[in-house]
């Protein structure tokens, strides 16, 4: 039954994307954004967003929370649209200026044939970063979590590959190839703003959030820059901002610094973060064998 449901979901999405293709990208985003809003309204996804907002901003008035939930859902749909139509999104951002001191750090690393780790969050139009860096002659790969739907996964992975290759699935079986890629001077994008059961409990938006230390570990181990990157939408246009590299200290301090930088952007544009994640889940308590 689950296989049939997965097939139907993927087939419906592919049909929708085909029907919307004649529209300009902005129009496709508007339609898919509205669909995403209604999916959130009518499913348990709404409660997931509300739980996160209750934790982070418990005093937010109900009307404001409802508006933010709707806007966040629409933004999630618009961001997925950019991934599902990578060629059109690439053309859209082809001439965007790249802001911030991180660009010079990446250019220096590239010129020395050194790798780099780019970290961002599920915020704004995050794939714009990799598209614009490709224009600079820097191909940026990425890590992703394979989707549970085997018929949808090729569509999502293909969209990510449209902004840069290679794409590494999460998991230790792919770790060796990832390390070799960085040693050979590759640049890798990671979005470490999801719950990781064995991560360090680091502050994010004012609350401890289990955070992966892997991006900082990779940067330290290979002596390469760790560059926070963000692509907010402001005044109807996408910005690509490459911030100053995070100084090499300890993995915990470096990832705390990243959480602070992402918190700044989320506070500035709260509807542009992916509130659908269970970011503040508590790990299951360890089991104890009975005597």
Image (spheres, rainbow, N blue to C red):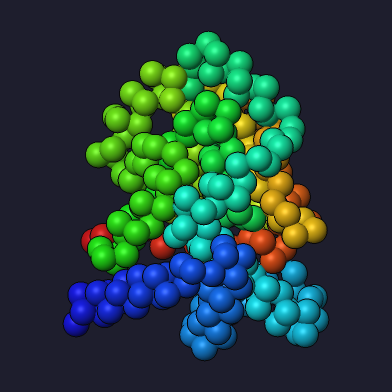
Residue in the image at 31% along x and 72% along y: 10
Residue in the image at 48% along x and 34% along y: 140
Depth check, front residue: 239 or 105: 239
View extreme (top): residue:
112
The location of residue 131, given as percent across then percent down, is 54, 41
User: Is 229 situated left or right of 177 in this image?
Assistant: right
For the question of whether residue 240 can be seen, the reply is yes
Q: Is residue 15 above or below residue 250?
A: below
- The quadrant the C terminus occupies is bottom left
The location of residue 179, given as percent across then percent down, is 36, 27
For the question of whether residue 213 can be seen, the reply is no
Depth check, front residue: 188 or 215: 188
Residue in the image at 61% along x and 20% along y: 107
Query: Which quarter of the figure has residue 135?
Result: top right
The location of residue 112, given as percent across then percent down, is 53, 11
Q: How many marks?
A: 0
């Amino acid at each position: 039954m689950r296989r049939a449901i997965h097939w139907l979901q993927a087939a419906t999405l592919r049909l929708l994307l085909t029907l919307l293709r004649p529209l300009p990208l902005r129009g496709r985003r508007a339609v898919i954004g509205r669909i995403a809003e209604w999916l959130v309204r009518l499913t348990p996804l709404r409660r997931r967003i509300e739980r996160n907002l209750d934790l982070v901003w418990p005093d937010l008035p109900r009307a404001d929370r409802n508006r933010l939930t709707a806007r966040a859902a629409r933004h999630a749909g618009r961001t997925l649209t950019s991934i599902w139509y990578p060629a059109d999104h690439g053309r859209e951002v082809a001439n965007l200026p790249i802001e911030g001191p991180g660009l010079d750090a990446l250019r220096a690393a590239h010129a020395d044939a050194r790798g780099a780790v780019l970290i961002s969050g599920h915020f704004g139009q995050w794939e714009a970063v990799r598209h614009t860096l490709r224009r600079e002659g820097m191909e940026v790969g990425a890590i992703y979590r394979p989707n549970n739907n085997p018929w949808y996964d090729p569509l999502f992975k293909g969209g990510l590959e449209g902004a840069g290759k290679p794409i590494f699935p999460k998991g230790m079986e792919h770790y060796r190839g990832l390390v070799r890629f960085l040693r050979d001077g590759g640049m890798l994008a990671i979005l470490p703003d999801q719950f990781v059961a064995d991560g360090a409990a680091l502050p994010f938006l004012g609350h401890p959030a289990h955070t992966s230390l892997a991006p900082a570990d990779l940067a330290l181990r290979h002596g390469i820059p760790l560059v926070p990157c963000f692509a907010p939408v402001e005044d109807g246009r996408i910005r690509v901002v490459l911030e100053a590299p995070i100084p090499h200290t300890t993995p915990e301090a470096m990832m705390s610094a990243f959480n602070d930088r992402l918190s700044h952007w989320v506070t500035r544009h709260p509807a542009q973060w992916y509130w659908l994640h269970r970011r503040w889940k508590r790990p299951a308590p360890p089991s104890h064998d009975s005597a």
